Image (cartoon, rainbow, N blue to C red):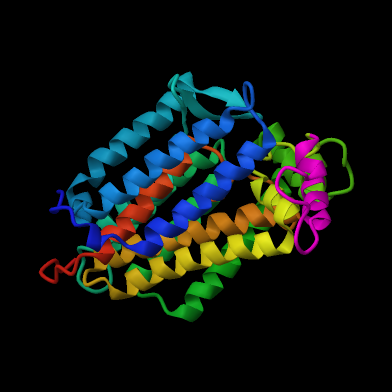
Amino acid sequence: MIIRPSWRSLDPFLIGVPAALLLLSTVFIFSLGIGVGGTLWQRELLFASIGLVVIVLMSWFDYRVLWSWIWPVVVLVAGLIVLTEIFGFEQFGAKLWIDLGIFQLQPGELVKIVAPIALARVLIPAQGRPSFWRFLTGVVVFLVFFGAVARNDFGTAAVIASVCMVVFFSLTKVPVQRFLLTIGLVGALSVVVLAAANRAPFGGLLKDYQRARLTSFIYPDRDPAGSGYNVQQARIAISSGGMLGKGIGFGTQSQLSFLPLPHTDFIYAVIAEGWGMAGSVLVLGLYAALIIRAGTVASRSPGIFGVTIALAIAVKWMTEVVINIGMNLGVLPVTGIPLPFLSYGGTALVVNAFCAGLIAAIAVRSLRSFDR
């Protein structure tokens, strides 16, 4: 499983970029003074250190072992989802976490990487186009994961859907035109379904907090002091930052507690207020470097399994960045999707570190004997 460690094999992009994002996260969370005595930044620093260790260790990991291990992992994650339904605690209207004392585990974050790997495991063994039954099995695997997560968390379910869709179309060799058309149709259908779910007789399809978020997105000025408050404050914070920002710790919206959840959902607004457009461009540049590197590794991997994993992770990061920044700008509904390596949260951080390490493991191996 573990190849003999070699420091020269470590990928500078896949360690340096996450390290830079984690440093930014720790600094800005420190500036917010959140937590008992303002010590939340210390927990973020601890998780950041664990994340960097995970990246290094995963770089020496033989990722091909996932081919055999994925089904026990699927069973484990499915069990965690069930336990969340039974023993999980509710926060902001959603039951997404299991309190383990040391930290709060969010199984939905695990599904973002487990689902596409399981889907690849189903589709790859077929020669050429997957058989009908294998394809149908893949659809069932996707629907089970999507349905289990979407019940409480549409945002995470959207990320899972986008990643799995790319895996489906890349492995079944669907033409690009049909792929883009399908994405467009799915997007249009999603809008129709969500709009219908907010009205009778379909109101029961969405929970109260989900309906409130959707309503505030469609009608942002209807309840500016209620459901639309978060987005309004995020917009003010971003626009007030100007070109160079107000400086770390000097933002009015973030420092005076006008901006809710500044360390998680809206940390992009905090950075934009503190560092202005320059900071926003820096963050986008770091994400672009990370995603491009993942795409490069995917294009150079000698095996289909490695290609699929790297591509899925690249799409995962890209989707999360688009959704999170989109909801900060008010052009997408608030869904609670964290910014990779920037938003506070132990589960998401460790999962993203695992993903970066997986890509690094694929990058340092050229085992051409592995045909899958």
Please name the residue shown 53% across and 46% down the image: 156
Tell me the residue at 44%/22% (across/down). Answer: 102
Q: Residue at x 82, y 40 (%)?
A: 229
The one nearer the camera, 210 or 262, is 262
Residue 241 drawn in magenta = yes
Q: Is residue 211 magenta?
A: no
* Residue 263 visible to an observer of this rendering: no
Residue 91 visible from this viewpoint: yes
Percent of width and height locating residue 55: 33, 50
Q: Is residue 170 left or right of residue 218?
A: left
Which residue: 46% across, 62% down? Answer: 315
Left or right: where does residue 196 sit relative to residue 136?
Answer: right
Q: Find residue 289 and report its horizontal and vertical position in percent.
A: 48, 67
The mark total stands at 0
Looking at the image, the residue that sits furthest to the left is: 369
Look at the image and tell me in which quarter the C terminus lies: bottom left
82 to the left or right of 225: left
Residue bounds of the magenta highlight: 233-256
270 versus 174 height, above or below = above
Residue 101, quarter of the rendered image: top left
Horizontal and vertical percent position of residue 138: 34, 55
Quadrant position of residue 281: bottom right
- Closer to the camera in the image, 189 or 180: 180
Nearer to me, 103 or 207:
103
